[in-house]
Every structure is written in C-alpha cells, then in structure tokens.
Amino acid sequence: MQQTQLDKLNTHQSIRESEQQVFEWQQKLKKGTESGLPLYKSKVLEKDIEKFNKTKI
C-alpha cells in the first residue's frame, strides 16, 4: 500500500471504521501477493510488468 492511501484515511471517522478500512486494504494486498504481484516497486521489473499493470485487485 502506498503512503498516500494512509494519508487519505479519514481521521475523523470512528476507530471501528478505520480498522475496517485498513482490513480491506490488507485483504487487497493479500490477494495481490497471492496472485504473484510484488510488494515492492523494485521487484516489479523482475516480474511481468504488463501483468502488474493490468491486474485489478
């Protein structure tokens, strides 16, 4: 997840809502890594860049 996603987190929402949003991000990240997408931009070049760009999580 990019830092910008964390910056977009609404600090005025309830803790429960924040936890739910972070959980959803974690699930998207999990699906991506399970499908072979790299966690780090430096690793993207080692993988198929087209697959990385076309995958919708």
Image (cartoon, grey):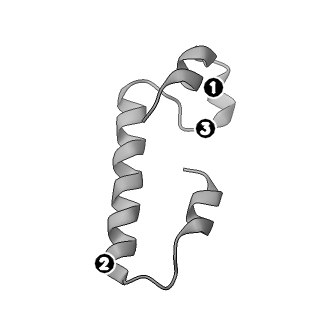
Q: Where 46 falls versus 15 (above or below)?
A: above
Circle 1 residues within 10 Å: few <14, some 14–19, many ≥20: some
In terms of image quadrants, where is residue 45? top right
Contact (Cβ within 8 Å) of mark 3 with mark 1:
yes
Q: Where 55 falls versus 8 (above or below)?
A: above
Circle 2 residues within 10 Å: few <14, some 14–19, many ≥20: few
In terms of image quadrants, where is residue 39? top right
Q: Where 5 falls versus 49 (above or below)?
A: below
Q: Amino acid at mark 1?
A: Val
Q: Which residue is mark 1?
A: 44
CA separation in Å, label 1 and label 2: 33 Å
Q: At numbered mark 1, what does the secondary structure look like: helix, strand or loop?
A: helix
As drawn, the label of residue 16 is 2
Mark closer to the observer (2, 3): 2
- Dot 2 or dot 3: first in sequence order is 2
Across and down, in percent, residue 31 comes to 35, 36
* Residue at 59% from the left image edge and 66% from the top image edge: 8
Mark closer to the observer (1, 2): 2
Contact (Cβ within 8 Å) of mark 2 with mark 3:
no
Q: At numbered mark 3, what does the secondary structure look like: helix, strand or loop?
A: loop
Q: Amino acid at mark 3?
A: Tyr
Q: Which residue is mark 3?
A: 40
- Dot 1 or dot 2: first in sequence order is 2
Q: Quadrant of the C terminus?
A: top left
Q: At numbered mark 2, what does the secondary structure look like: helix, strand or loop?
A: helix
